Amino acid sequence: MTTVVIQTIGRILVPFIQLFGLYVIIHGPVSPGGGFQGGVIVGASMILLALSYDLSSAEARASHKVRIAMDSTGALLFAGIGLVALLAGGFFLEYGIIPLPMAPAEVRGIFILLVGVAIGIHIMALAASLFLHLAEEHEI
Amino acid sequence: MDHAPILVVIAPFVGAYLIPLLGLWKEKLCYPVATVAALLSAFFSFWLTASVLELGTIRYYVGGWEPPWGIELVVDPLSAFMCLTISLVSLFAVIYSKNYIGRELPGGKTTSYYTLILLLIGGMLGAVVTGDLFNLFVLTEIFSVAAYALVCIGRKRGSLIASYRYLILASIGTSLILLGTGYLYVVTGTLNMADLAARLPALYDSWVVIGAMAFLVVGFGIKTALFPLHTWLPDAHSIAPAPISVILSALVIKVGAYSIIRVLFSIFGVEFITGPIPIASVLTWVAAVGILMGSLFAISQTDIKRMLAYSSVAHIGYVVMGVGLAMEIGMTGGILHIFNHALAKGCLFFCAGAVIYQTGIRSIDDFRGLGSKMPVTMAAFTLAAASMVGIPPTAGFMSKLYLALGTLEAGAWVFLIVILVGSFLTAVFYLRVVNLIYFGESRVKSQESRVGVGDSRLQTPDSRLFREVPLTMLIPIIILALGCTLFGIFVFIPLSVVEPAVKLLLGN
């Protein structure tokens, strides 16, 4: 049973939770956190929305198709970064070796951020799906 | 640098994540993508095997981090052998899926089917190339979860309960594996298999190490469906769609057996498992009971797929028995049987699937007279059955011959008798089917009321009864059946990989 109090608090909190989640993803390379943790936070905000309002308002913002697309895109980005490193002559995911016009440490920094973003996209869709997919109506 | 170890795993995984994306757009693209992914991983397996035979064991540092810090992929001849078996049989299973799944699954499910089947293949390939115990646990869990979902994807009666039983029992197995891994980590401080092997000899007296071994063997024993732990297998393997039955019976339980070999021989070492803690001979006895009981259960089945499933319980016994003998010839036979059984059982499940696809027949009694209606499929069935029984010159005969010689090498006459009796029992239930196929009187007239897999679209059941299955299903059947014969005559081809593997495992 949702009330005005829950809905109002939820409405205020959701954007901040999502912003914090994105912060955790982006700051992954320099502070505790990273793609997985940030992704779970963003995904949890959709669960809060579904609980405080209803399933359809969460579905309107993260529909089944969007979640599947994000899930696959994140995983493919991750594999793609690994394969780019492989093409550059290193081991799989040895992204420090990718030739970019900057210092090797900076290259590593950029690519660990990209890896974090890829995992973040994947996990935020997955965390939301864990709840929403079970709640959606399916034929058995 | 040789990238085949990671590419063989990455190809199916990339395919698995590409398919949902393409499935949103066009569902028809799923099948070609899955086939290409399976084809790529088969290609990389060949490449991998060639370079392993040439250069010896390959070590691949993922991310460029060396073992104590990073995860290492170690491909020795045994891993390469498993990679080849897995990628070849699963390639045929994917090809076979096109028509079969098109009819069996409701629309909209094909996307998840191909995604899951590629995750299953990728997980198995990952489990056999990894050199890290924890990574082995993670990949075991990946392919197991995909397998649970695939068992019930057909939504047949009883498929949910079969899948649920498989889920519960195999999850207990996974938990035991995790516990064992944790115990080993506590006493040694490492999860890398080579590191573990180096540090364990000093700790052989520790009860923690013995406990860890017990947990790992029982955990992987459940995954392998070793005799007393097999109760999930018959339901799950018989109710799954045919291509999935093939992968489960031919490959998934073999990956469990591979994990037992890896843990016992590459981590604990052959001196430990045959000396102070004689786990190897315990496994041999358990396997011997499994061979006899599995065959006896199979004789009493009336459903063709259940019979084949129980026969898998018996044949995984041959593999584990060979491994448990822990001597050169016996182990060669056991490991060779992984490949030969995968070919034969894959072919048999494909044939059973083809019969179910065309006619809806599941009961062995109704196989009467099928030999004249589906001649190619039934010829393949007979060849594969001959290989299961071990009639020369089929492949099954060669691995059983090596096993029998191995029991003599070990001086264990009891197991020789078990192998012979097991083969006779196998002959009883396979030759019964073959006899019905060719010499049984046809019952087509009474069959017309019988329902096929997709009976709503099956307008004229009697005209379909006289046809062979489509080419995408027939070609895998023919190739596997030919493989059963050719690899018996040209047994040196698989042996060229198996023999170095056994030498490496036994440490000489």
Image (cartoon, rainbow, N blue to C red):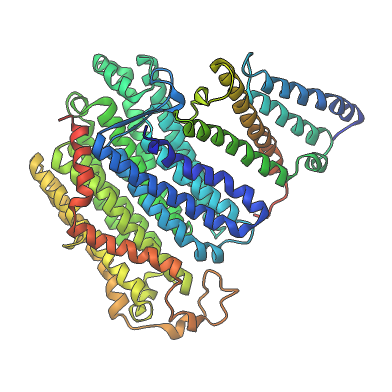
What residue appears at the point 35 percent right and 61 percent down from the top-left corner? B347
Residue closer to the observer: B163 or B253: B253
Give x and y (percent) for residue B135.
43, 30
Give x and y (percent) for residue B365.
37, 73
Residue closer to the observer: B230 or B357: B357
**Can residue B354 be seen from the camera position used here?**
yes
Q: Is residue B212 above or below residue A131?
A: above
What residue appears at the point 45 percent right and 66 percent down from the top-left corner? B472
Give x and y (percent) for residue B363.
41, 70
Residue found at the far right of this picture: A4
Give x and y (percent) for residue B165.
48, 46
Indicate the quadrant where residue B129 lies.
top left
What residue appears at the point 14 percent right and 39 percent down from the top-left corner? B328
- Report the quarter where the N terminus of chain B lies: top left
**Can residue B426 be seen from the camera position used here?**
no
Residue closer to the observer: B73 or B257: B73
What residue appears at the point 42 percent right and 36 percent down from the top-left corner? B6
- Report the quarter where the C terminus of chain B lies: top left
Could you tell whether B315 is left or right of B137 in the image?
Answer: left
Residue closer to the observer: B252 or B471: B471
